[in-house]
Structure formats: C-alpha cells, structure tokens
Image (cartoon, rainbow, N blue to C red):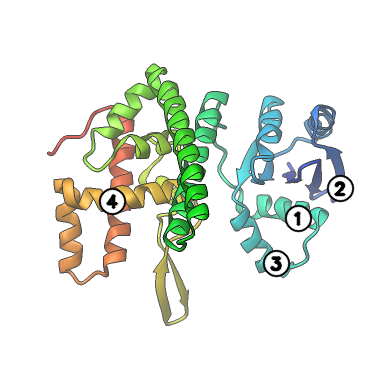
Amino acid sequence: MEQVYVGVDVSKDRLDVHVLPRGEVFAVARNGEGLEELNKRLGGLGVSLVVVEATGGFETVVAASLAGASLPVVVANPAQIRAFARALGKRAKSDPIDAEVIARFAGATRPELRTLPDEQTRTLADLVARRRQIVQMIAAERQREKRTQLRRVLRSIKNVVAALEKALNDVDQEIDDSVRGSPVWREKEDLLASVPGIGPVTARVLLAEMPELGSLDRRQTASLAGLAPWTRQSGQWRGKSFIGGGRAGVRTALFMASLTAVRHNPVLKAFHQRLIAAGKPKMVAIIAVARKLLTILNAILRDKRPWQIA
C-alpha cells in the first residue's frame, strides 16, 4: 500500500499543506473551521504520517486537533527541517515550499510517533517557559545596572527588577501549586529530587518539557535532550564530536544541574574525576556527566525507585 506523508507549515493565520506522493497542495485558516476542513481532507487519504513544524506555540492546537481526529501526527524540530531543506538544496523561504519540505522530511526520516502532552502538561510547560523568560529579563536588567551611574536610570532599573521578582514569585507559586497538587507529578518530582544535584527547578523543567522521561531508552532520552554526540566524518577524516538539537531548555537545566552534581553527588563526582584524569576537556566531561545524569533520572522514573548508592 502506498505511503502517504503530509507536511503542514504553520503560521499565525493559516496552514499550508502538502501531500506526498499525490502532490496535492492546499491551505486552510488556522481556526476552528480550518482545522475541521483539514481533518476531513486528510481523514480519507489513509495518511501514514503528518509532520507539523514547531512554530512558537502556534502548532499546539493544530497537532492536538489532528491527534483528536486519530491522525498520526508528529511535531518536528524546525532546526532539523531547515537542515533537511539545505541538504535538498532548497534555500527559498515561502510557506508552500516549506510545506513540501516538511512532507519530504516526513517520508525520508519517518520520525517516531509519541503521545502528545495533555493540557495540564502543556500548561506547566508554559509556566516553566515563562519563568525562564523572567529570569533572563532580571539578568539583563542586572547587567544594565552595572553599566550606568545615572540615578534616574538606576531607579528605573530597580523598579523593573522589583516588578520582575514579584512576577517570578507568582509564577513559582503557580508552578508549585500545579506540581504539588498532582499526586502523579508530586511523586515524580520527589523521585527526581532524590538525586543529589537535582533541585525543584530542574525537576520541574524535566516534568514540563520532557514528559517522556522514564518511558524511553537512554539513547532516545539523550537524543531528545540534545545530549547525544554526533561526529563529522568523511573517509579517513574524523572531526570533533558535537551535541545539539533536541530540547534546549532541558539541556540547559541538566548542564546546570551537572555543575552541582560534580560537587555533591558521589557517583557523578567520581565519574567526572575519572574523565578529567583521562585528559578529557572540562566541557566534554561536564556534558558526559549531564548525559549520565539524564540516564540515571530516566531509570529512576522508569523503576519508580529513589536515588540510592549501590
């Protein structure tokens, strides 16, 4: 049976759709009527996979609607699609071209289907993302404070920082109420926080932005977090390994947690020291610690057993 792949390019007001191998192209509005039309048109095609490019949150309701219509849908990382487009030699930027590239990406890579986050998880993810934004704004204001001596500017900065700190406290309280108010999340947070080096902030980032944790193998978790190394190689030439892609918020949280873990977690501290003694650069060693930490956290949630030293 012929495999049918669909690419959906999402913008604020419309959805551009490309169906392969039929070559069918159409667009619908990004509203209730448009989504209903999209579901009807795709419903009778025997679709193998629909790929929607992540677009600043606009894709969420689209993916939920498609999943609700029992269509196999995956939300793809835009960086992967851009890299795929460059490999195809497509540099033009237009929505129909993007929809075709996304459809071809679906057919070539066949990304794995995963359960979409429920509404409660999406809400927590939005709160965690907002917390990260506020922290970044506070840091930016602190930097501005260091660069000025003008009293009026300093007073303005202090007022802004005070308002941001209040907003941060409010968001922290909402996150705390969400996590501690859910028996499932409360259990998972307690399990994650049992690992030395993992605090409430890191645990909640993982709950919100990596809900699959505990249900995947170690390679899949490393790939999702962007901690899986990849190497540039051609013939006899072998370049340095890099990490990248995946979920940047998760990777950043794990990196910061690893800096704490190498001081306070006996297992990871010893692992880090062995890497340094073997001549590994400090950054490479910390990334390896982050990857091992993620593997430990995945096993803890999978087995539902708190941290313990063997």
Label 3 sits on residue: 88
Q: Nearer the viewer, residue 253 or 165?
A: 165
- Tell me which label, 4 or 3, sits earlier in the chain: 3
Q: What mark, if any, has residue 98 been given in the picture?
A: 1
Task: Give the crowd class for mark 2: few <14, some 14-19, many >=20 residues within 10 Å.
Answer: some
Asked whether the beta carbons under mark 2 and mark 1 sit within 8 Å of each other, the answer is no
Question: Is residue 247 visible in the rendered structure shown here?
Answer: no
Q: Which mark is residue 25?
A: 2
Dots 4, 1 in contact, CB < 8 A: no
Which of label 4 and label 3 is nearer to you? 4
Distance from Cα at disc 4 to Cα at disc 3: 38 Å
Mark 3 or mark 2: which comes first in sequence? 2
Q: Earlier in the sequence, mark 2 or mark 1?
A: 2
Alpha-carbon distance for marks 2 and 1? 12 Å
Instruction: Describe the element under mark 2 as helix, strand or loop.
Output: strand
Amino acid type for the residue under numbered disc 3: Leu
Image quadrant assignment for residue 240: bottom left
For the residues marked 3 and 1, what is the alpha-carbon distance in whole angstroms?
Answer: 12 Å
Disc sitting over residue 258 in the figure: 4
The answer to which of 42 and 129 lies nearer the viewer is: 129
Which element is circle 3 on? helix
Residue 18 visible to an observer of this rendering: yes
Q: Nearer the viewer, mark 4 or mark 1?
A: 4
Residue type beneath disc 2: Val
SS class, disc 1 = helix
- Number of on-image labels: 4
- Amino acid type, label 1: Asp
User: First in sequence: mark 4 or mark 1?
Assistant: 1
Tell me if 117 is positioned left or right of 183 in this view. Answer: right
Q: Secondary structure at mark 4?
A: helix
